[in-house]
Image (cartoon, grey):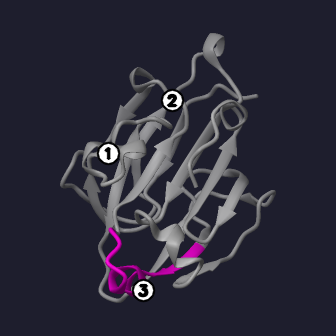
Amino acid sequence: MSNEPISIAAPFCGTVVAMSHVPDDIFAHNVVGPGRALLPETTSSIVDVRAPISGNVTAALPHAFSIESGNYSALVHLGVDTVNLRGDGFTVHVRAGDYVTQGDVLVTWDVAVAQQHGYSLVCPIVLVQAQEDHVTWVVDEGDVVAADEIIMHWSVPTETAVHTHETVPAPL
């Protein structure tokens, strides 16, 4: 397992939102881990959601996915309560077990469907079980970032490395 620092990229173009402003207590209180959230910026309703890191897909649901790379695990949740859409508005391009490269399109999301149902489009990008002092923030709340732009770095010291997906299940 690699303990080399990892860089996390924005999965789409958007405005950075502090996790404390995500309208879901699990994410707002960093229960699963720290991170940043993005509000999609798009001229159309279609958003191609990309892999924030390279690694193995450990979960691939229409509204959320997670990727593990060595001792690191990242979770991307597309909107809040969008699980209730039961896949409507989402096209998933990968399956659990697939290897993906940072920047690969994993999901195509029609945000208009979520908007029509009144769901928040804020998307948490969570570093599963990370300790906040092991994360370097590259962007701040209110920044607008491009797809694939690096938004944070994460380093797991050798003595604290764990298999994150095995110890705390992420809410998908």
Residue in view at x 58 percent, y 77 percent: 86
Whichever of callouts 3 and 1 sits on the residue coming sooner in the sequence is: 1
Relative depth, front residue between 28 and 91 = 28
Residue matched to label 2:
130
Relative depth, front residue between 48 and 164 = 164
Few, some or many C-alpha atoms within 10 Å of disc 2 (few <14, some 14-19, many ≥20)?
many
- The spot of residue 135 in percent (x, y) is 42, 30
Residue 138 disc label: none
Relative depth, front residue between 150 and 113 = 113
Q: Amino acid at mark 1?
A: Met
Q: Amino acid at mark 3?
A: Val
Residue matched to label 1:
19
Q: Is residue 124 above or below residue 162?
A: below
Q: Nearer the viewer, mark 3 or mark 1?
A: 3
Whichever of callouts 2 and 3 sits on the residue coming sooner in the sequence is: 3
Which quadrant of the figure contains the N terminus? top right
Q: Which stretch is magenta?
A: 107-120
Q: Amino acid at mark 2?
A: Ala
Residue in view at x 36 percent, y 45 percent: 25
**84 on left or right of 96:** left
Residue matched to label 3:
113
